[in-house]
Image (tube, rainbow, N blue to C red):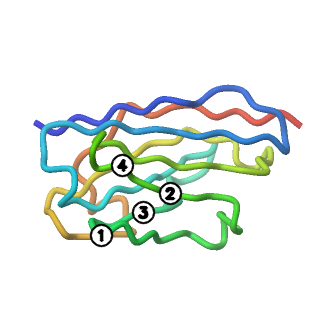
Amino acid sequence: QVQLVESGGGLVQAGGSLRLSCVSSGHTFWDYAMAWFRQAPGKEREFVAAIDWTGTPRYNLDSVLGRFTISRDNAKNTVYVQINSLDPEDTAFYCCASPRLPETLEYDSSRYDYWGQGTQVPVSS
């Protein structure tokens, strides 16, 4: 059974940085794309970034604006997202996700079968 566990969230001031981590277990991590989504209060869940099985990143450029960097460490079964220049608009609940099939990268959250419990990132102004 695939399990994803996020960490690294917490209150941060505007302009600050944060690195979120997501440890995966239960599948051959290196064969799977991994993604980060977020959901702000009162808004729909939004794709933030993904990284495929080769390590190639994809970003939601509208929201990321060059401030987010996704990476993965296959030896640690972990995917990260580094967030710089945080803005109060980045306040959201951040979740990592994995698709059911290997070597598949999706942007639609409905195509992801496995989700972590999420981590809250409040950004104060």
Q: Position of residue 87 (x, y in %)?
A: 80, 48
C-alpha span from label 3 to label 2? 7 Å
Q: Earlier in the sequence, mark 3 or mark 2?
A: 3
C-alpha span from label 3 to label 4? 14 Å
- Taking the image as shown, residue 8 lies to the left or right of residue 55, namely right
Q: Which mark is residue 73?
A: 4
Q: Earlier in the sequence, mark 1 or mark 4?
A: 1
Q: Which mark is residue 70?
A: 2
In this rendering, the label closer to the viewer, 3 or 4: 4
Q: Position of residue 99 (x, y in %)?
A: 23, 58
C-alpha span from label 1 to label 4? 11 Å
Q: Secondary structure at mark 1?
A: loop
Tell me which amino acid carries mark 1: Thr
In this rendering, the label closer to the viewer, 3 or 1: 1
Q: Which mark is residue 54?
A: 1
C-alpha span from label 3 to label 1? 11 Å
Q: Earlier in the sequence, mark 2 or mark 1?
A: 1
Q: Circle 3 is placed at which residue position?
A: 50
Q: Secondary structure at mark 4?
A: strand
Residue at position x 66%, y 39% in the image? 18
Q: Residue furthest top?
A: 10
C-alpha span from label 2 to label 4? 11 Å
- Taking the image as shown, residue 103 lies to the left or right of residue 84, namely left
Tell me which amino acid carries mark 3: Ala
Asked if disc 3 and disc 2 are in contact, CB closer than 8 Å, the reply is: yes
Q: Earlier in the sequence, mark 3 or mark 4?
A: 3
Q: Nearer the viewer, residue 77 or 123?
A: 77
- Taking the image as shown, residue 17 lies to the left or right of residue 33, namely right
Tell me which amino acid carries mark 4: Asp
